[in-house]
Image (tube, rainbow, N blue to C red):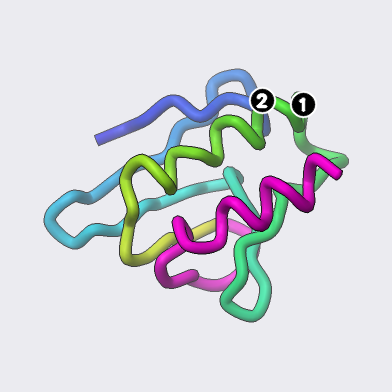
Amino acid sequence: MPHHTPGHSPGHVVYYHQKDNVLIGGDLFTSRRQRIRKPMSIFTANMAQAIKSGQIVKKLKPKSLCVCHGNEVQDPHKQYDLLREKMLS
């Protein structure tokens, strides 16, 4: 099921596979060492909107998040608040 997550680009979407509890995040985040990180600033049209769109991980609470730039991240919803706070400061 697609979910609209603008910010990186106006039409950005993520796909959630409920049966396997996996979120295909595209460019919603990047990741490194099993941690979610902000999307690439140089390629993100609206970072504030991207941060807001990232809340989808708190809503869906996927067990696994796959992103285009980085490796799979387990339980990303447990990391989102810290990342959001860091990005806003």
For residue 65, above or below residue 84: below
Q: Which residue is mark 1?
A: 45
Label 2 with label 1: CB-CB less than 8 Å: yes
Residue 64 sits inside the magenta stretch:
no
For residue 55, above or below residue 35: above
Q: What is the quadrant of the N terminus in the image?
A: top left
- How far is the residue under mark 2 from the one under mark 1? 9 Å
Q: Residue at x 53, y 57 (%)?
A: 67
Along the line of sight, which residue is nearer the eye, 74 or 77?
A: 77
User: How many discs mark residues in the rendered view?
Assistant: 2
> Which three-letter amino acid code belongs to the residue tagged 2?
Gln
Residue 31 at x, y = what percent?
A: 64, 65
Horizontal arrangement in the rendering, residue 39 relative to residue 23 (left or right)? right
Q: What is the quadrant of the C terminus in the image?
A: top right
Horizontal arrangement in the rendering, residue 21 relative to residue 8 (left or right)? left
Q: Regarding mark 2 in the picture, which secondary structure is present there?
A: helix
Task: Give the magenta-colored segment's residue range.
Answer: 68-89
Q: Residue at x 87, y 40 (%)?
A: 42
For disc 2, the neighbor class at 10 Å (few under 14, some 14 to 19, many from 20) is: some
Q: Which residue is mark 2?
A: 49
Q: Residue at x 55, y 40 (%)?
A: 54
Give the image quarter of residue 74. Answer: bottom left
Q: Residue at x 43, y 47 (%)?
A: 57
